[in-house]
Image (cartoon, helix red, strand yellow):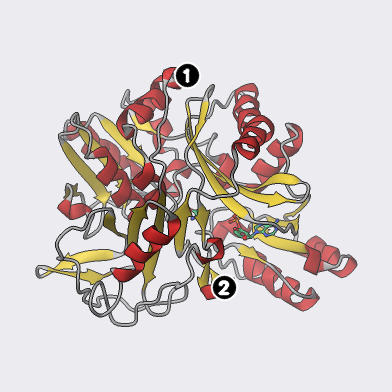
């Protein structure tokens, strides 16, 4: 069968890499893809948000399955559009994706179904939000834009001035566009974080192996938030008992609540959790695979991904089992100079043509092919992903592939402390 993957990041490269391992897959297409996906299949020059152009491409090119990577096409209703046209697509509907696309909607939903989450105060009026700042200790809150902001719409103010600056950026300057029409002040929680991705058909929900992202740009969690600078899986503190508790108090109630709302949820449901002294709480939901968490998680997946995607679409997940290798995996993101601010592009990348190494895969994100060479074209450029018997082995393998003797580009920045807290 022919499959189209929408998106052009490391996550989409990893999805393609895993799907290609299935003997049932003939050809992969990526819209728009990147320099790495071009080696795995065919890149189609259509942007992920151009959902009508994607629909007509799928109708004309004998594509049997479409897999949505990023959130934007979901928020535009690509799944609804495809289903109306009787096409097979993996992902949630526009309304279901509100769990990610509107943090205000998600908070109201969690409130209604008693799913543990930080206490939140919502504002659509700038002046009223300022009154809140004046009357509260803002260092106990985080400020969030309600809509989609590429993981960058969360600000942790130290004082009233910083809180006011954050509000001005989000609500007045609209740094995150319409995502800033509504804003939340959310109780600031503490504790380790975990990304728990699941696959669901709206009735059954199957967790994938847990992962931990590294959101800040610099080592020791310093500097601004990014889309994610690296991840590892599994997370050692995610015991069977904790997972069972999360399934009972968070995952199943979410799926059941959506069913009650008559907005059945299928696709990937990603719970961004904080394990507080008061138990696990939902910081955010995502309606899709995480990037870069997908890279180490799929590196550990033994089961066929394709049949899981079909079971989600067809409502047959109950009969499925999912098996992961009992190993560790890690992904180190190499980013462009300047990221997450404005960054350099068009820098040649060396070391990509080395002989493939066992348990090491280089997933591309912001790369493109020009005159036969791979050059940088985005903020996050590559996701060096390695697995091993334990985290130490996986880390050694990944880090030893990076540098002037290995994979290198001028100005590249990456965190040297991915997974280090564990060792
Ligand atoms: P989000 O995009 O909502 O996951 O937020 C991005 C990051 O901001 C999270 O990974 C946390 O590190 C931090 N964060 C978000 N919400 C809270 C909260 N309520 N308390 C503490 N930290 C938070
Ligand atoms: N790595 C966080 C995300 O995909 O939202």
In the image, residue 351 sits, relative to residue 55, either above or below, namely: below
Mark 1 or 2: the one toward you: 2
The single residue placed furthest to the right in the displayed view is: 135
- CA gap, disc 1 to disc 2? 41 Å
Spot occupied by residue 35 in the image (x, y as percentages of width and height): 21, 60
Spot occupied by residue 41 in the image (x, y as percentages of width and height): 17, 47
Q: Which residue is mark 2?
A: 220
Please indicate whether residue 320 sits to the left or right of residue 147 in the image. left
Who's the residue at 42% across and 55% down the image?
Answer: 292
Q: Which quadrant of the view contains residue 100?
A: top right
Secondary element type, mark 2? helix
Q: Which quadrant of the view contains residue 216?
A: bottom right
**Foreground pick, 213 / 312:** 213
Who's the residue at 46% across and 58% down the image?
Answer: 231
Of mark 1 and mark 2, the one earlier in the sequence is 2
Spot occupied by residue 410 in the image (x, y as percentages of width and height): 29, 82
> Which labelled disc corresponds to residue 318?
1
């Amino acid at each position: 069968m022919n499959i189209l993957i929408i998106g052009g990041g490391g996550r989409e490269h990893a999805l393609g890499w895993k799907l290609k391992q299935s003997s049932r897959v003939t050809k992969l297409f990526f819209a728009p893809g990147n320099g790495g996906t071009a080696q795995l299949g065919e890149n189609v020059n259509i942007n992920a948000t151009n959902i009508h152009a994607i629909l007509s491409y799928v109708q004309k090119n004998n594509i049997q399955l479409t897999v949505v990577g990023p959130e934007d096409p979901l928020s535009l209703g690509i799944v609804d559009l495809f289903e109306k046209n009787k096409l097979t697509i993996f992902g949630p509907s526009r309304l279901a994706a509100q769990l990610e696309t509107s943090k205000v909607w998600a908070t109201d939903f969690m409130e209604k179904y008693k799913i543990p989450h930080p206490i939140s105060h919502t504002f659509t009026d700038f002046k009223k939000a300022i009154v809140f700042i004046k009357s509260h200790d803002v260092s106990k809150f985080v400020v969030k834009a309600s809509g989609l902001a590429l993981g960058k719409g969360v600000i942790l103010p130290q004082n009233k001035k910083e809180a006011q600056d954050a509000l001005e950026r989000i609500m007045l300057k609209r740094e995150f566009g319409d995502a800033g029409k509504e804003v939340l002040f959310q109780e600031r929680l503490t504790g380790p974080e975990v990304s728990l991705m699941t696959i669901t058909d709206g009735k059954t929900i199957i967790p994938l192996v847990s992962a931990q992202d590294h959101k800040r740009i610099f080592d020791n969690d310093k500097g601004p938030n990014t889309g994610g600078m690296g991840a590892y899986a599994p997370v050692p503190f995610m015991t069977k008992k904790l997972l069972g508790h999360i399934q009972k108090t968070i995952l199943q109630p979410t799926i059941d609540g959506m069913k009650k709302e008559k907005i059945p949820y299928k696709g990937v449901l990603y719970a961004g959790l904080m394990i507080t002294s008061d138990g696990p709480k939902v910081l955010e939901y995502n309606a899709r695979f995480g990037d870069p968490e997908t890279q180490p998680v799929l590196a550990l997946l033994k089961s066929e991904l394709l049949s899981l995607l079909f079971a989600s679409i067809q409502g047959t997940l109950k009969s499925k089992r999912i098996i992961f290798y009992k190993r560790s995996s890690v992904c180190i993101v190499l980013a462009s100079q300047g990221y997450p601010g404005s960054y350099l592009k068009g820098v040649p990348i060396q070391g990509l043509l080395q002989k493939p190494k066992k348990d090491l895969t280089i997933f591309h994100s912001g790369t493109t092919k020009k005159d036969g060479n791979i050059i940088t074209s985005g903020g996050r450029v590559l996701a060096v992903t390695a697995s091993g018997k334990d985290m130490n082995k996986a880390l050694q393998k990944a880090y030893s592939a990076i540098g002037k003797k290995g994979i290198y580009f001028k100005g590249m920045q990456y965190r040297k402390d991915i997974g280090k807290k564990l060792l």
